[in-house]
Amino acid sequence: MKSLRITLGVAAIAIGSFAAFSFAPASSSAKVALQEFYVNPDGSQGAQVTGNNQCKDQTQILCSQEYDTSTGEPTGNTSRMHRGPRN
């Protein structure tokens, strides 16, 4: 009977530990970091946009867009694409 209580106690601790880690938030390294960057004339990623975006939104030339910083690739989010010359 005593060994059954020990077995059940160990099982309860194991289940409790598993449940605690199952609902813990993911680590910060697993989060996707999206940032807006200016686009260089050759189409490559330029400087990060800080403060207000300096694009005038007047022409079809891409001025800035959102990038996934973990992959370095553009996200394709059209609401975060700005076109036109930079002020």
Image (cartoon, rainbow, N blue to C red):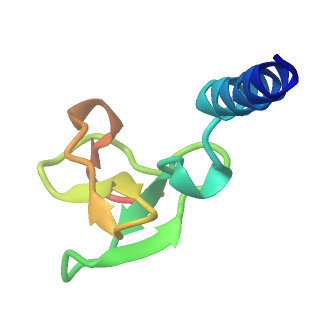
With respect to residue 60, does 24 lie above or below?
Answer: above
With respect to residue 52, does 69 lie above or below?
Answer: below
Q: Residue at x 65, y 51 (%)?
A: 28
Q: Which image quadrant is residue 62 in?
A: bottom left
Is 12 placed left or right of 76 in the picture?
Answer: right
Tell me the quarter of the image containing the N terminus. top right
Residue 2: percent from left, percent from top: 88, 22
In front: 26, or 33? 26
Q: What number of labels is visible?
A: 0
With respect to residue 27, does 39 lie above or below?
Answer: below
Residue 18: percent from left, percent from top: 64, 32
Is 3 placed left or right of 70 in the picture?
Answer: right
Q: Which image quadrant is residue 4 in?
A: top right
Q: Residue at x 35, y 74 (%)?
A: 45
Residue 17: percent from left, percent from top: 74, 32
Is 22 placed left or right of 73 in the picture?
Answer: right
Is 78 placed left or right of 12 in the picture?
Answer: left
In front: 13, or 9? 9
Q: Residue furthest toward the front?
A: 1
In front: 1, or 80? 1
Q: Which image quadrant is residue 58 in?
A: top left
In front: 27, or 79? 27
Q: Residue furthest toward the bottom?
A: 42
Q: Residue furthest toward the left?
A: 60
Q: Residue at x 21, y 35 (%)?
A: 78
Q: Residue at x 27, y 78 (%)?
A: 44
Residue 41: percent from left, percent from top: 24, 78
